[in-house]
Image (cartoon, rainbow, N blue to C red):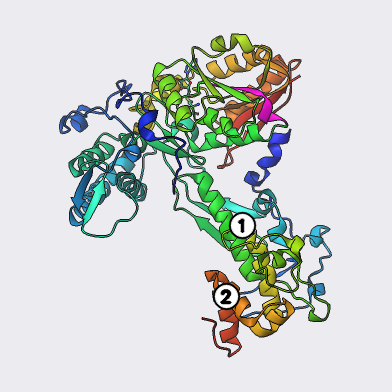
Amino acid sequence: MILRLPFAIRSALPSPSLPLHRRPIRSPPASALSSLPPRPRQEIPLFLRPLAHSAARSDLDAFRRWAKSLALTAAPGIAAAADGGPDADHLIRELSWLVQDATSEPEVGDEVRLRVGLEELYRLWRERIEKRRPFQYLVGCEHWRDLVLVVREGVLIPRPETELLVDMVAEVEGFQEGLWADMGTGSGAIAVGIGRLLGVRGKVFATDLSPDAVEVARFNVERYGLKDKVEIREGPWFEPLQDVKGKLAGLVSNPPYIPSSHISGLQAEVGWHEPRLALDGGKDGTDYLLHLCEGSASALKPGGFFAFETNGDKQSEFIADFISTMWGNFFENVETVLDFAGIKRFVTGVRR
Amino acid sequence: MAARALFRWALLPSPKRLAPPLLRTPRSRLTLAPIEAFSSSTSTTNSATNYLRLTDEELMALCDIDTFKASGPGGQHRNKRESAVRLKHRPTGIVAQAAEDRSQHKNRASALARLRKLLALEVRKVIDLNDYTPPTELLQILPAKSTIRGSDVGPQIGPNNPKFALGMQALLDLIYAVEGSVSEAAKILGLSTGALSRLILSDDSLRMSVNGLRTSKGMRPLK
Ligand SMILES: C[S@@+](CC[C@H](N)C(=O)[O-])C[C@H]1O[C@@H](n2cnc3c(N)ncnc32)[C@H](O)[C@@H]1O
């Protein structure tokens, strides 16, 4: 697919370094690490780098064969860990995406132009398999809705389920001209998704406590030419939104919702590499969700809409019940909404 | 709540047993039956005879959708792109899928576009040539020189336009009605045989469908 960037890639980058990597929360076992050379700082997502390298087609093919066999060899071990990690088919699909991002359109001839050296591709794939480093961090992006969002360590990789939050906003009458907030914006996914649909008077405030998230979100907002539509603000939940209190047409958030006790058993790609700040929702996982629901009462204007992502069936039901019983005089039409897998993933409602 | 309506298709409603208002044609083995045979006693929505006229949402509601399986908790727990989307249109059993993109959003859109095309190609309506006026959708895909095409029809819609499927479907209905004779269809559409052939050849699946019919009737395929 072809993404037409709203402006030149180079100018979008303040400097050649998106400063990288906070340390992962928990490191993979030392045995996995020891064989790897130290990772250089990733500067620019793979797909945005110039085609400054090249390799013989036969050498690229040899890389593919090697990478495939590494994946096939590792797959049984990953399956045995039973943490929901990728199977061989999935890894092989990722491999083709890696090559896709590293090369340009199908090229004819014996030389293939590359965005990284071949040695770097070997190194990246080894990290994918041996350290379970998420594919999206290797290539520095995630395809989400019709967007290609830049991500890096320190920032949550946006999930496919979350795509629906944008659709829910787009269903709200008159949403185009309203003021919206995406709290805990991470990579800016939801805010950029909404920002692209807004009219001239519409605006999204995207907030996050994490400086990494703020930086990456800012990058994505600029990359899509949305500086006028999406305003990034750093700080905890409602704090950066004091000046628009009671004026918001809608609030959306995908707050950390995993119960603390589940964190240690997460899929390695998630637990070892994604920021705990983005995942851990306290004892029952509902600490932030409840805080957001409560704060919505004063942040939203009358008739304002909220939609929050949750951990699934039980949590959604709990939150929906809690709002109806405790704050029933503030909100109406409180309900749960299914994701594509049929799980009650979201809670939505309207400020009276 | 308004947001709800959008996701109705995701709930996989159990199929309303609609008698199929239109025939599905398995490739060139076409069985034509009078349209009355399909008037349904069980359904009031029978007048919506053309699936292609449904909105994306309405069409989705008639489909079973397989995306990622509901294995595990999903959401923040999981890092796995399972972006392939497979749509099965329950009334006809036609299946369309897309997996080539990393984003599920796009795969859904491509699967749906593919489904529309397959429906256009495979679902035939019987038309009565004695009382036939080409529908607007068909006029819209005809070249401007067609003598039956008024200037109010607007510019010609090409194969890359999503609206092409509706016109293509109506064109195939006509070509089936004239049993594959391009010259006869051309006459009805106010075109030269050459001009209609060129239109048919402009889209691969349209060409293949027409040629399948012609071959089954012992006619030469168009080239
Ligand atoms: C699950 S992530 C969601 C990121 C993004 N919205 C998405 O859907 O991909 C949760 C986000 O909330 C942020 N966060 C955690 N605690 C916060 C707080 N107290 N105030 C604001 N944001 C917070 C994290 O930094 C993280 O970016």
Residue at figure coordinates x 57%, y 26% from the top left: A229
**Region of the chain picked out in magenta, as a range:** A174-183
Choose between A187 and B99: the one closer to the eye: A187
> For this view, does A173 lie left or right of residue A97?
right
**Label pair 2/1, CB-CB below 8 angstroms:** no
Distance Cα–Cα, label 2 vs label 1: 20 Å
> For this view, does B210 lie left or right of residue A222?
right
Location of residue A225 in the rendering, given as x and y in whole percent from the top left corner: 49, 31
Location of residue B136 in the rendering, given as x and y in whole percent from the top left corner: 75, 64
For mark 1, does the 10 Å Cα neighbourhood hold few (<14), some (14 to 19), or many (20 or more) residues?
few
Magenta stretch encompasses residue A220: no
Residue type highlighted by circle 1: Pro
Residue at figure coordinates x 39%, y 36% from the top left: A141
Query: Which residue is tagged 1?
Result: B162
Location of residue A120 in the rendering, given as x and y in whole percent from the top left corner: 21, 39
Choose between B35 and B71: the one closer to the eye: B35
Query: Farthest bottom residue?
Result: B218
Residue type highlighted by circle 2: Arg
- Residue B126 appears in the rendering: yes
Choose between B205 and B29: the one closer to the eye: B205
Q: Quadrant of residue A314?
A: top right
Q: Secondary structure at mark 1?
A: loop
Which comes before the other along the chain, label 2 or label 1? 1
> For this view, does A236 lie left or right of residue A178?
left
Q: Quadrant of residue B22?
A: bottom right
Disc assigned to residue B198? 2
- Image position of A248 with respect to A339: above or below: above
Q: Secondary structure at mark 2?
A: helix
Same chain shared by disc 2 and disc 1? yes
